[in-house]
Amino acid sequence: MQLSEKAAYVKGLIDGLELDPADKQTKIFKLIADLLADMADEIKELEQCYDDVCDQIDGISEDLSGVEDILCDEDFSDDITYDDSDSDEMSYEVTCPNCGCVTYISEDALNEGVIDCPNCNETLEFDYNEDELDEKE
C-alpha cells in the first residue's frame, strides 16, 4: 500500500466507527486523519521532485563524463609541452616523471631547484650544480 492509500484507509476506519461528531476526541481523530492524508500527498510530491533531480543529475553526469574523456585523455596530456623561457636565454628541457609532460625552464628556474609541473602540479626538484656540469664537459 502507498502512503496515500494507508491515510485513506485510516480515515475510512475513523468514519466507520460512527463516532459522535460533536465529541472532542472525534474531532482530533479526523484532524489527524486529514493531517496524514496531507503528509502523504506532500511526500508523494517530494518523491517526484527527487526523481526529477536524480534524472537531471544523471544527465549532467553523462555530459560531464564526455567532457572528462576529452580533457583527461592520457594520449592528449602526453603531447603537451610548455615553453616558458625567453628566446634569448638558455633553457633546459625537463620531463615530469609523473605525467610525462615536457617543460622548458630557464637557468634561473633551474637554480631555484624546484618547480611545479604545469600539467599535473607535481613538485619537481633539481639538484643542479654548475661545477658538476663543467667536469662532465
Image (spheres, rainbow, N blue to C red):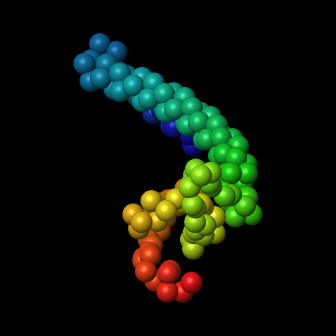
Question: Where 67 sits versus 89, above or below?
Answer: above
Of residues 133 and 53, the one nearer the viewer is 133
Residue most extreme to the left: 24
Residue 64 drawn at (x, y percent): 66, 45
Of residues 40 and 78, the one nearer the viewer is 78
Quadrant of residue 29 within the rendered picture: top left
Q: Is residue 51 visible?
A: no
Quadrant of residue 39 within the rendered picture: top left
Of residues 7 and 59, the one nearer the viewer is 59
Residue 129 drawn at (x, y percent): 42, 77
Q: Tell whether 53 sits left or right of 132.
A: right
Quadrant of residue 128 within the rendered picture: bottom left
Of residues 27 and 45, the one nearer the viewer is 45
Question: Where 14 sits versus 115, above or below?
Answer: above
Residue 2 drawn at (x, y percent): 56, 40
- Residue at the spot x=55%, y=37% of the render? 50
Q: Tell whether 33 sits left or right of 6.
A: left
Residue 102 drawn at (x, y percent): 63, 64
Q: Is residue 56 visible?
A: yes
